[in-house]
Amino acid sequence: MRPEILNPLFAEVEALKGIGPALRRPLERLGLARAVDIAFHLPTGWVDRHAVDRLAEARPGQVILTTLTATGYRAAAGRGPFRVQAADAAGDPVSLVYFGGNPGWARKLFPLGEARRVSGRLDAYGEGLQIVHPDLVLQPGEAEPPLREPVYPLSEGMTSRRLGQLAQQALARAPELPEWIEPSLLAARGWPAWRAALNAAHADPADQAARERLAYDEVFANQLALMLVRASARRRRGRALVGDGRLRDALSLPYAPTGAQRRAIAEIEGDLRQDAPMLRLLQGDVGAGKTLVALMALLVAVEAGTQGALLAPTEILARQHHASLSRMLAGLPVNVAILTGREKGRVRDATLMGLADGSIDILIGTHAIFQQDVNYRRLGLAVIDEQHRFGVSQRLMLAQKAATPPHVLVMTATPIPRTLTLTQYGEMDVSRLDEMPPGRQPIETRVIAEDRLAEVVEALGRLMDQGGQAYWVCPLVEESENSDLAAAEARAEALRLRFGAERVGLVHGRMKGPDKDAVMAGFAAGRIAVLVATTVIEVGVDVPNATLIVIEHADRFGLAQLHQLRGRVGRGTGRSTCLLLRSGALGETARARLALMRESNDGFRIAEEDLRLRGPGEILGTRQSGEHVFRLATPEQVQALLPVATDDARLLVDRDGGLDGPRGQAARLALYLFERDAGVALLRGG
């Protein structure tokens, strides 16, 4: 339960004065549903007004506040602007310009001969001066605006001043709270108290101490929540899983595991031997061999008399895991089954019975594997692949399928920067696969302008003539009226006209499962030479004969996603190429992304750069439910404040009595204030 002292701040926005349906919509677009959201919606800059008695005291380009009197009106022909001719106290002239064809509004604001206080940007225009759309017109005696006024991020239908007024109402609801920062750290940094910092950050966006204090609070609450979850996980008792090696010894592997794989397997085995449930993150670059590590972990669970479950984010990936694990386990007494939304009727019933009676050892599937009617006899280990696609609440549901908490191994092929690993996965132990299995070829990456498309198609034809295969990735499924992106369907049609319908396949997210499977099977068997796809192929598709991937509009993708897509090739012994087709006009960020892709195959370096270019909210491609994106702390602040916040949280837990001491009681409020309280319960699911 949230402490009562915070309830006024967590009220819905309707509790603020003046918010009706017209204002609610722009607030919704900004994600501002409660007073606390508005309080944490900080300004990004400010307007400095210069109060002047005469126009001669101001420079063009300045935002001024002065008294003007309307002397006449001038309407332009057609749809031209309407001008109010005005003069300052000394009689010097200025035009007040209004576009939009509603002169009645401007006449009402400026009755002839009456003085008004006017604020706006003064510009030189021809021989004279003008103010286009003054931002404020007040009658004498009305409250003056502040000379420094914050500028907020806005959506259509909302002005900065209106948002500032709502922010003041939200701030009035913010209570004085006891201090949760360690006193010597607070003194050394010279930070204000929490409520004073929040007020200052809205009043003066240039106040760095206030901004840094708020960023620190958010990072501290995050690190404390992760630390508490980890401590709680270690106190819980699960079931120690000790395998006898009989299944793993009988496995015939295509190559000897790399040093990194052996190290990760040993770390996981060590975790499984404990009765505290494992919570480990396995990071491995594309093609680093995570599947083998996961299989070894699952076999330990089976050897120890329990069941294993492998959760995949898409049906394509679940079916591929099922096929590859079944192949690797051929001849071993291990029963592997699959469960996705497509399994219906008797097939599904048989699988559910096999899980309940324990005859199924390993279940592979999509989120269907933790639905209500799925019951395991003895679930010992849950492996979650591409873990950023699942919210913590889904992982928790899977963990609740066992009588005692199961061990959890989460895997990602999206290398995660160290900063992010600490802020989002700090409750987990981490294993990294930073070596490639033998035989993996480096992929040559080239950036090509879209106007050379014909040359790319020619090169594709030559590859097909030699028996090669390729992927062609498009960002959208179908052409929309306002989109200039090349659509997957249009591209597939064009390639079919050139190479023949039977040699070009198409997969996208809206296709029915069986249709998608049929195309993927045709590509894997070599009957289809070119697979045109949307980003559904981003993870897990494995066709060693495919040595070329063409990515259209590569400048529209994030770095992590481009690296994932590139990893679809380079899986066999042939030399592989990734062609990034770029549009003509590139922004700075897109140019930097493509340059890095060209020069580096190192997923971890790419991930660090992606964090720098994009910020932490989007690093993993999709925002997961239950994932906390920092609202007050910038990526730079997270990086700078993380070590201090982690140390401070550890000090609170180890020295200052945890959440029970006086500082702990204050820190408990911080957990609720920054909404890391739900995380404490949910993160236990992994």
Image (spheres, grey):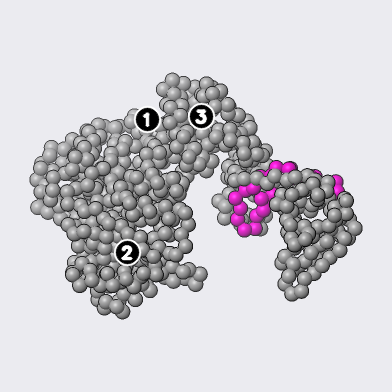
The Cα atoms of the two marked residues, 3 and 2, are separated by 51 Å
Residue drawn at x 29%, y 78% is: 498
Q: Secondary structure at mark 3?
A: helix
* Residue segment shown in magenta: 139-162
Q: Mark 3, residues whose alpha carbon is within 10 Å: few (<14), some, or many (≥20)?
A: many
Looking at the rendered structure, which numbered label has been put on residue 231?
Answer: 1
The residue sitting at 18% across, 35% down in the picture is 242
Closest to the observer, 554 or 253: 554
Task: Give the main secondary structure, helix, strand or loop, of the magenta stretch.
Answer: loop
**Label 2 secondary element:** strand
Comes first in the chain, label 3 or label 1: 1
How crowded pointer 2 is (Cα within 10 Å; few <14, some 14-19, many 20+) is rated as many
Q: Answer whether residue 340 is visible to the viewer in this image.
A: no
Q: Label 2 sits on what residue type?
A: Val
Q: Along the horizontal axis of the image, is 187 left or right of 322?
A: right
Q: Quadrant of residue 243?
A: top left
Choose the circle earlier in sequence order: 3 or 2. 2
Is 296 contained in the magenta span?
no
State the CA–CA distance, disc 2 to disc 1. Answer: 47 Å
Q: Which residue was labeled with disc 3?
A: 667
Quadrant in the picture for residue 513: bottom left
Outermost residue toward the right in this view: 113
Residue 3 is situated, as x and y percent measured from the top left of the image, at 56, 34
Is residue 157 shown in magenta?
yes
Q: Position of residue 621 (x, y in %)?
A: 40, 52
